[in-house]
Amino acid sequence: MHDLLLRGGRVIDPEQGIDGICDVAFQGGKVAAIGPKLAQNAHEIRDISGLIVTPGLIDMHSHVYWGATALGVDAETISKRSGTTTFVDAGSAGAGNFAGLRRFIAEPSTPRILAYLNISFPGIFGFSKNVMVGECEDLRLLDSRECLALAEQNLDLIVGIKARVGARAGGSSGLAPLLLAIEVAEELGLPVMAHIDFPPPGRREVLDALRPGDILTHCFRPFPNAPITRGDQVRADIIEAHKRGIIFDIGHGFGGFSFRSARAMLAEGILPDVISSDVHVLCCDGPAYDVLAVMSKFMALGMPLTEVIRATTQNPARAMQRPELGSLKPGTPGDATVLDLCAGSFEHVDVSNEVITAQTRLFSKGMVIGGKWWLEASGC
């Protein structure tokens, strides 16, 4: 007998090519079976007819080191409204304070928490409306040996190395933080996630340094370092980088996403590989909110529902080299998100304060984590 059966929902699992009415069964913390009209022998049966079931949503760029870093938000609070079952903390912690992220945040959390380790020893430490000190401004804080040693001891949680470059995050350090991060990542066989803000360095310098499989976050950002020209044409170096395997991650946040850039990129046929929120204290109440809100923005721009789900399940799992996530294949961890595609009039805003209106929006109706029904959300 199964522990839990989700009955009659529209299952969308891009990794398996599934989009249809199916039941999903869970046993022993894992997906046990998926298919139409499974035997109704389960300790708990939930009828979710009319709703959408996806693999557990992954927010591959978040900041959930709550209480220990100034930008951190509480993962469970965000999870309850967004249906996120896996958060990836994008560099809040460095080698000097990763132990706290592990012990006090990741281990007791119901949603899974993974991490990109910051190349800077203290992680992101000066981040608020009034205090903004880039952790990569002082090269004395960047020690590749410390970063490598800590990462090697925590590879169950660490999925890559994070470097924030740009005038705000790195001051006059230029490309040095990114080059150090790449050196560590090469030793580990992991990708780098590169944040880019105001130049220097410029977009082209960052793209030239990245390897196939590395991640450019804030990839649909506004000017400066935008992926498009004044005439809304996608820049040639952006097209070339995507073709050679650089992974484009949205990382919406407080300054990393504009509708103008997104429209031009989508018109060129370049969909985001990964849709993520970059949720932190300055954007959790807008404009980013959470990954479900960002997914809804891309649907408002015309991105198909299946591709929006792919960019928050299959694609981030691949980018993190965690193939066991992002799918409802039998034997995979028992995580699923239940969504409602609601009709109405919904306003969306980007970091440049452009507002668009959509006729549909995704809402969370609940989730399964570790094979157990964790939460029933209010939905529309």
Image: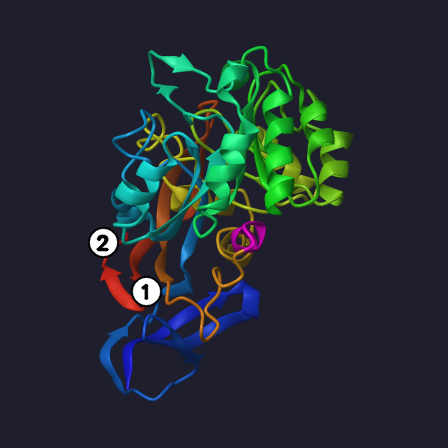
Asked whether the viewer can see residue 257, the reply is no
Residue 249 location (% of width, % of height): 56, 40
Find the distance from the CA under tag 1 to the CA under tag 2. 21 Å
Mark sitting on residue 378: 2
Residue drawn 57% across and 50% down?
319
Residue drawn 51% across and 13% down?
138
Sequence-wise, the earlier of marks 1 and 2 is 1
Residue located beneath label 1 in the image: 370
Which one is closest to the eye, mark 1 or mark 2?
1
Residue 255 location (% of width, % of height): 47, 24
Residue drawn 74% across and 30% down?
208
Q: Main secondary structure of the magenta part?
A: helix
Q: Tag 1: residue type?
A: Gly
Cβ atoms under marks 1 and 2 closer than 8 Å: no
Residue 179 location (% of width, % of height): 65, 28
Residue 195 location (% of width, % of height): 55, 29
Q: Which portion, as a residue range, is magenta? A: 315-321
Give left or right: position of 234 versus 172.
right
In the image, 189 versus 128, the foreground residue is 189
Give left or right: position of 209 versus 114.
right
**Quadrant holding the N terminus:** bottom left
In the image, 374 versus 171, the foreground residue is 171
User: SS class of the residue under badge 2?
Assistant: loop
Q: Is residue 91 magenta?
A: no
